Amino acid sequence: MKRFIDRLFPEVSPTKLLSEHAEYCMKAGTIVPQILDDYFNGKDIMQYSKEIDEFESSADEIKTRLREIYTKLRWSYFDRIDALEIIHNQDSIIDAVDDFVKILTMNKVDECPEEVIEKIKLMGDYVADVIKFMKVSVDELRTVVESDFSPNEINKEDNLTFDVEKDESKTDSLGIEIGKTLYSYKNKMNPVDILFLNSIVVLMMKIADRAENVVERIRMIIR
């Protein structure tokens, strides 16, 4: 009987684990602006990689627990595939932020126009904001489930989805703008530095895209 009850009502709620995992994503994402600030000020940023590795390790433990729960669970408010898709995208955020730091350590840009630096820093702010909104969206999923899909809670989730899509759209537009600005300096800047910085910008756009994927999946669940 106990095994049967455990399959219906696990000791830890899957939505609670998703929220805990998203917390580590947010911790990794919110230091992106500081990483960029330190990088352009010529400081050592490798320390951040160690910090993100710790977030990644803790997040992996949560991911393993979630998978174990869904191998035993007989019933859930939403499908196992949805939960694993959410956690896969959240995992990708932490991985991408780690890549972001490590790639930045590979090259020190000789001279970078101030307008480019400011726009790249602004991109970092946008990325951090998108991940924060994603975390709130994951928390709201838990509330929606615990409220038995209350219409009021669903409306809150819809508003959060709009905020994330708006910020993700900002990162796309700003990413293209930065790319155009970078290439306008092709006769003034080191071409390697232009390509390098552009690759960093593209990576930040992908991070924001992963956060939006999480929110999109959540919207599909509650609808």
Image: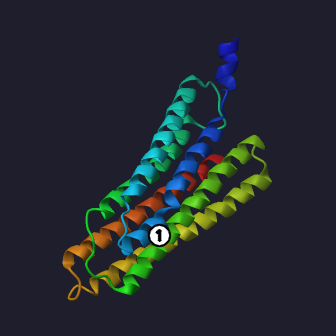
Which three-letter amino acid code belongs to the residue tagged 1? Gly
In the rendered view, would you say 160 is above or below 126? above
Instruction: Count neighbours of disc 1 (C-alpha within 10 A) and say few if under 14, some if 14 to 19, many if 20 or more.
Output: many
In the rendered view, would you say 136 is above or below 74? below
The reply to whether residue 175 is in sight is yes
Q: Nearer the viewer, residue 66 or 38?
A: 38
Residue furthest top in the image: 1
The reply to whether residue 223 is in sight is no
Q: Residue at x 39, y 80 (%)?
A: 117
Quadrant of residue 13 within the rendered picture: top right
Residue 110 position in % (x across, y down)? 25, 78
Quadrant where the N terminus is found in the figure: top right
Q: Nearer the viewer, residue 97 or 54?
A: 54
Q: Residue at x 54, y 31 (%)?
A: 65
Q: Residue at x 31, y 72 (%)?
A: 197
Element on which disc 1 rests: helix
Q: For this view, does 165 lie left or right of residue 143?
A: left
Residue 136 position in % (x across, y down)? 65, 56
In the rendered view, would you say 114 is above or below 215? below
Q: Residue at x 73, y 59 (%)?
A: 156
Q: Which residue is mark 1?
A: 124
Residue 141 position in % (x across, y down)? 67, 48
